Amino acid sequence: MRLAILSDIHGNLHALEATLADLNAHAAPDEIWVLGDLCLMGAYPAECLQCVRALPNVKVISGNTDRRLVTGERGAARPKDAEEWAGFAEWLTQRDQTHNWTISRLSYADFEYLANLPEELELHVTGYGWLIGYHGAPGKDTANLLPDTPADEVLDHFLDREGRLGFGGHTHIPMDRDLGAWRVVNVGSVGMPKDDPRAAYAVVTFENGSAQIEIRRVAYDVEAAIKALQQSGNSAWEWAAQNFRRA
């Protein structure tokens, strides 16, 4: 059984198309999971959503930005010093403009789809056992499970879940940690990787009772994605573009 897992597309169609081309050339998965944050930030929110929905044997969950798009919520933000405070009002304006522009590009059918996405996935693999998928952590889509997060803090998020393998996204930083009771994997980000300019996703092959996990990296035209933002009509495009250059 082979499972492909993508996360954190963020409206970046250039990265998504490159990732799917690599997936089609590399592996024929039995199922595809997409772990949320589909639309917000890039130039093509609706197009990315349509592309994901058209994938064969795909299961999709909501991420924190998907939730905020459909509820009107905004993430908590707090400046760390006087310098950040001086620009805080403008930062909030740019952030909110990007949210509002993204909403303007989505149809009501898109809204209904995002609003009805589940928060988690689960799958039983014969000969291996249960695995689960979530965005940040089980039960909390904003949790940051990082490569250096203490093991006990990571495992606390799994106390009321059954299984042995968990897949998430949200941090945009891949990891693969065997913590005994759970193996916890972050598949990275398709659209806004933090640690590498290339898109990231995972291919998992279950065979003979084991799970072989490969984090694949895919180069794409970052500058073309930024140019598309510039031409998108989002007046806060420069603010959004910073997120594509973070790596």
Image: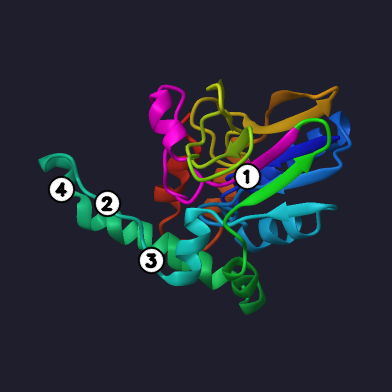
Q: Secondary structure at mark 1?
A: strand
> Which labelled disc corresponds to residue 85?
4
Q: Between disc 4 and disc 2, whose residue precedes?
A: 2
> Which labelled disc corresponds to residue 133?
1
> Which labelled disc corresponds to residue 193?
none
Answer whether labels 1 and 3 touch (C-beta < 8 Å). no
Residue 244 rendering spot, x and y as whole percentages: 50, 39
Residue shown at the point (66%, 50%) measured from the top left: 121
The vertical placement of 92 against 33, above or below, is below
Residue shown at the point (44%, 60%) measured from the top left: 98
Answer whether labels 4 and 3 touch (C-beta < 8 Å). no
Of circles 4 and 1, which is in front? 1
Answer whether labels 4 and 1 touch (C-beta < 8 Å). no
> Which labelled disc corresponds to residue 77?
2
Q: Looking at the picture, which amino acid does disc 4 mark? A: Trp
Residue shown at the point (62%, 55%) measured from the top left: 61
CA–CA distance in space, label 4 to label 2: 11 Å
Q: Secondary structure at mark 3?
A: loop
Q: Nearer the viewer, residue 74 or 121?
A: 121
CA–CA distance in space, label 4 to label 1: 37 Å
Q: Looking at the picture, which amino acid does disc 1 mark? A: Gly
For label 2, count other residues whose C-alpha is less than 10 Å away and answer few (under 14), some (14-19) or many (20+).
Answer: few
Of circles 4 and 3, which is in front? 3
Q: Which residue is under mark 3?
A: 73
Q: Nearer the viewer, residue 141 or 15?
A: 141
Magenta extent: 129-157
Of circles 1 and 2, which is in front? 1
